[in-house]
Image (spheres, rainbow, N blue to C red):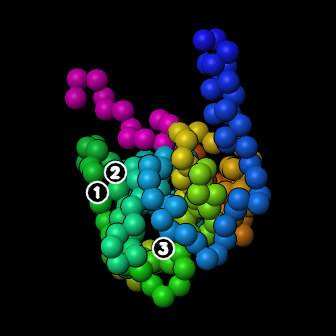
C-alpha cells in the first residue's frame, strides 16, 4: 500500500514536468482546452484592475467549448466584498485560438500558448470608456505549478511589455477566496 501511495505521489510530481515539445503556440485543438482550470497568476499594464477588488481580477473555474466553437469561461470575482459567480461566452473569430467577448467593455482574447494537460497562457485586451488594458493570465490544471511554468509566464509578460512589478501571483490555490468567518 505504501508503495502504491509513493508511486502515485511521484506520478503527480512527474506529471508537472516541463516539456517544451508539448507546448502549442498555434493551430490549437480547442477541445483540449476544455475542463477545470486554476488561476495561478495574472499581469496587467494597469495593475489596479487585477489587484484585490479589481474589476478584472478573476478566479477561473473552467473553460468549455460551446457548439459554435466559442468558449464558455466560468469564473468568480469579488464584488462589494461578495464572491460572484459568472459565466461568459467568447465568440469565435476566424483565427485559431482567438475570440471576442463583451465583458466590462469590448475584449479580444487570445491563447498565447498551451500544454493542454498542464497550463495555458491567455492574452486579453479590454477596451472600456476609451481606455485599453492588456491582461495576461496563467491558468493551470493543478492548483500550483512548478517554477518552470511560472518562468514561461514571466517570459510571455516581458514579451508583451509587462515587467515583474505588473505580475500578481494568486494564493488560495487558484480558487475562490475564503470568506470571512461568520459570513
Sequence-first disc among 2 and 1: 2
Sequence-first disc among 1 and 3: 1
- Horizontal relation, residue 159 to residue 181: left or right: right
Q: What residue is pinned by disc 1?
A: 86
The quadrant in which the N terminus is found is: top right
- Horizontal relation, residue 172 to residue 14: left or right: left
Residue drawn at x 74%, y 48% as measured from the top left: 18
Q: Identify the mark at residue 77; answer none if there is no mark.
A: none
Q: What residue is pinned by disc 3?
A: 109
Within 10 angstroms of label 1, few (less than 14), some, or many (20 or more) residues? few
Q: Which residues are magenta?
A: 170-183
Q: What residue is pinned by disc 2?
A: 76
Circles 2 and 1, Cβ within 8 Å, touching? The answer is: yes
Residue drawn at x 67%, y 42% as measured from the top left: 16
Question: 112 or 106, which lies in front?
Answer: 112
Q: Position of residue 2 (x, y in %)?
A: 64, 11
Residue drawn at x 55%, y 41% as measured from the top left: 142
Q: Position of residue 51 (x, y in %)?
A: 47, 51
Q: Position of residue 28 (x, y in %)?
A: 58, 72
Question: 169 or 51, which lies in front?
Answer: 169
The residues bearing labels 1 and 3 have C-alpha atoms spaced at a distance of 17 Å
Circles 1 and 3, Cβ within 8 Å, touching? The answer is: no
Circles 2 and 3, Cβ within 8 Å, touching? The answer is: no
Question: 70 or 38, which lies in front?
Answer: 70
Amino acid at each position: 500500500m505504501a508503495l502504491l501511495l509513493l508511486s502515485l505521489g511521484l506520478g503527480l510530481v512527474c506529471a508537472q514536468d516541463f516539456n517544451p515539445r508539448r507546448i502549442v503556440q498555434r493551430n490549437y485543438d480547442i477541445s483540449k482546452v476544455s475542463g477545470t482550470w486554476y488561476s495561478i497568476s495574472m499581469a496587467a499594464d494597469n495593475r489596479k484592475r487585477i489587484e484585490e477588488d479589481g474589476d478584472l481580477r478573476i478566479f477561473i473555474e473552467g473553460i468549455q467549448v460551446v457548439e459554435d466553437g466559442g468558449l464558455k469561461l466560468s469564473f468568480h470575482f469579488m464584488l462589494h466584498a461578495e464572491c460572484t459567480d459568472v459565466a461568459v461566452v467568447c465568440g469565435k473569430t476566424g483565427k485559431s485560438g482567438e475570440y471576442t467577448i463583451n465583458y466590462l467593455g469590448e475584449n479580444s482574447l487570445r491563447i498565447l500558448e498551451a500544454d493542454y494537460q498542464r497550463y495555458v497562457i491567455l492574452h486579453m485586451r479590454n477596451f472600456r470608456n476609451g481606455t485599453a488594458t492588456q491582461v495576461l493570465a496563467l491558468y493551470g490544471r493543478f492548483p500550483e505549478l512548478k517554477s518552470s511554468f511560472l518562468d514561461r509566464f514571466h517570459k510571455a509578460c516581458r514579451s508583451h511589455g509587462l515587467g515583474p512589478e505588473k505580475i500578481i501571483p494568486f494564493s488560495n490555490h487558484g480558487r475562490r477566496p475564503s470568506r470571512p468567518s461568520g459570513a
